Amino acid sequence: MTDNDEGFGHYAGLPTTEVHELSDGGWPPDSAAVAWRISAIHWTTMPRPIGEIFDAFFERADTSRVTAIVIGPWTGPNDESSKVVIDRLISEAERLPALRSLYLGSISLDETEISWIQQSDITPLLEAFPKLERLDVCGGAGLALSPVRHESLRTLRVETGGLDGAVTRGVAASDLPALEHLELWLGVEEYGGTTTISDLDPILRGDRLPALRHLGLQDSEGQDDIAAAVAIAPIIARLESLSLSMGVLTDTGAESLLSGQPLTHLRRLDLHHHFLSDAMMRRLTEALPGVEVDLSEQEEPDEYDGETWHYVAVSE
């Protein structure tokens, strides 16, 4: 599903513990020492209703000490939206005073494709957990976000095969004074990716993101246009790292980066999965000698019926 195993073996710096697997004698003695993975489906057992898994978690764990929760597949993630999960979390918010990190939709490719995951409105979740510091969301179908002010959120990651422009506008219009890491997988139009450069403009200005240090605008079929906008964006001067990876970045977009504002202050520039020429790759590394530039996964376009096709890393 994702480009790492975050949410499976570990999350938020903690090892994950699958509630589905735990027997009566197998519960961790310290509920703060693990990230709790709540899933209706597990490869070792038959599917169980997600409500039953939540019940076991709230009955047996010391939820007052739980800092991280990972939500795997809820019952029928292709048919039922994540609202059932969000509603349960909101109803139990008082029992989760220490919750700081939440991953909504940690679902493997073996279980479903990213663009088949049915999400829902995550605004109430942010409102119910004002101390949440990290939110990861996987899947864009049905995803919604209204503008909010959240004083504590430091990391927001939205992984999709196609990000609705309305969600991007919701992020852009939110006041997130503590946000340090913002990562949006924009995807393709075929799977609901309608985000435009104008939708991204408030993010690129950065007026509502005073603490931002990492920006990822990734997995876009319009990656060249994003690179051109980033090259003149006010927020770039105060970033420590930038990711324009996973998308259709060609020499045109890289040229925009080279001819725009200086990027030499960056610690890291992530461009992995790209369509750059060897010559352009050399130009980038030579122009940014003190920057860690990730140019891995140099892709070749597909040829079909006399046409050339470029592709993003994650779509369906």
Image (spheres, helix red, strand yellow):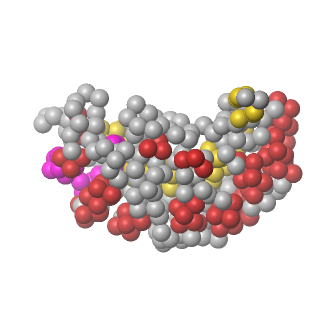
Residue 114 part of the magenta-drawn span: no
Q: Residue 233: image x %, image y %?
A: 74, 61
Q: Residue 17: image x %, image y %?
A: 30, 38
Residue drawn at (58%, 60%), measured in percent from left and top?
165
Of 10 and 249, nearer the camera is 249
Of 29 and 273, nearer the camera is 273
Residue ranking furthest to the front:
305
- The answer to whether 125 is drawn above or below residue 247 in the figure is below
Residue drawn at (73%, 29%), measured in percent from left and top?
305
Residue 46's quadrant in the figure? Answer: top left
Q: Is residue 191 visible?
A: yes
Query: In the displayed structure, does residue 188 sit left or right of residue 205?
Result: left
- The answer to whether 42 is drawn above or below residue 163 in the figure is above
Residue drawn at (79%, 46%), measured in percent from left and top?
253
Query: In the displayed structure, does residue 57 sit left or right of residue 247?
Result: left
Residue drawn at (85%, 42%), measured in percent from left and top?
287
Residue ranking furthest to the left:
24
Q: Is residue 38 visible?
A: no
Query: In the displayed structure, does residue 202 sit left or right of residue 76?
Result: right
Q: Residue 93: image x %, image y %?
A: 28, 63
Of 31 and 48, nearer the camera is 48
- The stretch in magenta equals 54-73
Residue 55 part of the magenta-drawn span: yes
Query: In the displayed structure, does residue 164 sit left or right of residue 62?
Result: right
